[in-house]
Amino acid sequence: MQKPLIIVNALIVNEGQVFRGSVKVAGGKIEQIIKYAAAVTDYVEDGYRVIDAGGKYLLPGVIDCHVHFREPGLSHKADMATESRAALAGGITSFMEMPNTIPQATTLALMEDKYRLASEKSLANYSFFLGASNDNIDEIIHADPQMICGLKVFFGASTGNMLVDKLSVLEDIFRLSPLPVAAHCEDESIIRVNSGAMLEKYGDDVPVEMHPHIRSAEACYLSSGLAVSLAKKYNTRLHITHVSTRRELNLLGNQLPLAQKRITAEACTHYLWFCTEDYARLGTKIKVNPAIKSADDRAALLQGLLDGHLDIISTDHAPHLLAEKAQSYFKAPSGTPMVQHSLPAMIEIFRKHNINIELLVDKMCHGPAMCFNVQLRGFIREGFFADLVIVDMDDEWTVSSSNIISKCGWSPWEGHSFRSKVTHTFVNGNLVYENGRFDGSSKGMRLIFNR
């Protein structure tokens, strides 16, 4: 039996409040939230393990709704064991993984293979998106919305033959899907024209600085507009992934509370941190799809989080080997590792702009749980699973190859010093990460959805 525990002397951040208190955990769930001081000796006598937060912040576990953990088929880059550990070190207790593995997860049987792998290897909680294609509508309509986080539709050819480019198929998907539709929105026809122009101008030596011109703001806006129009036509539950431009925000509403929205959207950490000025320094390390764009777009995305046009923050964690990223522009794959450093990076961004930590928790913990209807997670509430994170806001550390956990072994933040550090991560009441050490004796759970 799991020994009950109590986390004492914490600054608890939850549902728009920050208060001193303790959290009692038993049977993997939050048993009691005690405001202010708890009589610790009473719990010691009752057999509780006491963990002193030392006045640090206690947050709900981060839920990352957009990752690529590369297994099966691409495990030379990453796998569920390594990336779930990197996630835990970054305060992420639950993840939702995308279907562009090998084989691509476009059938329910292949989905179950991924769930089996995760049950054996992942220390974090997990769910997987079913991938849409031009010919798998029969699989889509039989998906169980309580057991699968969503359906991923690639409007752009970010992932090869998973591009859904037939309007009739898109109409069927938006009309019939029992799952929320998560859309990668870039117009392929525009990208092809732009790519051809750059090839003609530069040959094989296209500078990476041209990436946001090839995968342009126009390509994003046109594709996002199509997704929004289809969602409105069929009243589809649509989630637009990794919004990267100011202009796309005009397609999104902010009048309704998140729980009532039918169309939602996410910001990703790298679009909030980097901009076109960083290509000269980092090159293909920050080549991602959609492309990182201007400083003006970056500022607009942060404002979109503040005013409610953007509902959640995710990572689009997508590791590749450095040797792969070192290739020429068209050969270098798109994607960058994010899960270990996203929370410290976002804390730094919010501090810089004097934004309170309550909003950060709303966008990284509460919002994802509400957006995808995750059952009993994303909040510090009695009866909810004890997915919890302790963060020291004043423990400066520097990202280096020696402390990167992701299997790819690198980060665009190498050499950068973060002021905040995750010290403890609890998953289902188990202390799975503590000051650089992992306890792999318990595995994460499959996420369930209230739909």
Image (cartoon, grey):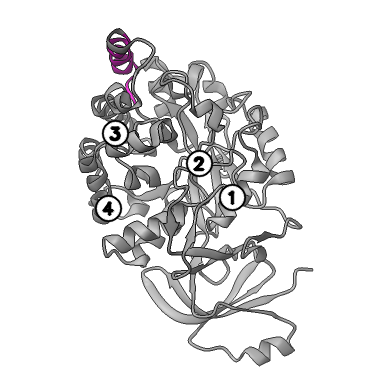
Magenta-colored stretch includes residue 192: yes
**Which numbered mark, 4 or 1, is in the foreground of this view?**
1
Q: Which mark is residue 337?
A: 2
**Which numbered mark, 3 or 1, is in the foreground of this view?**
1
Q: Residues under labels 3 and 1: Cα distance?
A: 38 Å
Label 3 sits on what residue type? Lys
**Residue sitting at 47 percent across and 37 percent down?**
336
Q: Are marks 2 and 1 in contact (CB under 8 Å)?
A: yes
Magenta-colored stretch includes residue 445: no
Closer-to-camera residue (21/80): 80
The answer to whether residue 177 is seen in the rendering is no
Q: Which mark is residue 86?
A: 1
82 sits to left or right of 287: right
Q: Residues under labels 4 and 1: Cα distance?
A: 29 Å
Query: In the structure shown, which secondary structural element does the residue marked by tag 4 occupy?
Result: loop
Label 2 sits on what residue type? Pro
Q: In the rendered image, which residue does mark 4 sit on? A: 308
Q: In the rendered image, which residue does mark 3 sit on? A: 232
Closer-to-camera residue (23/303): 303
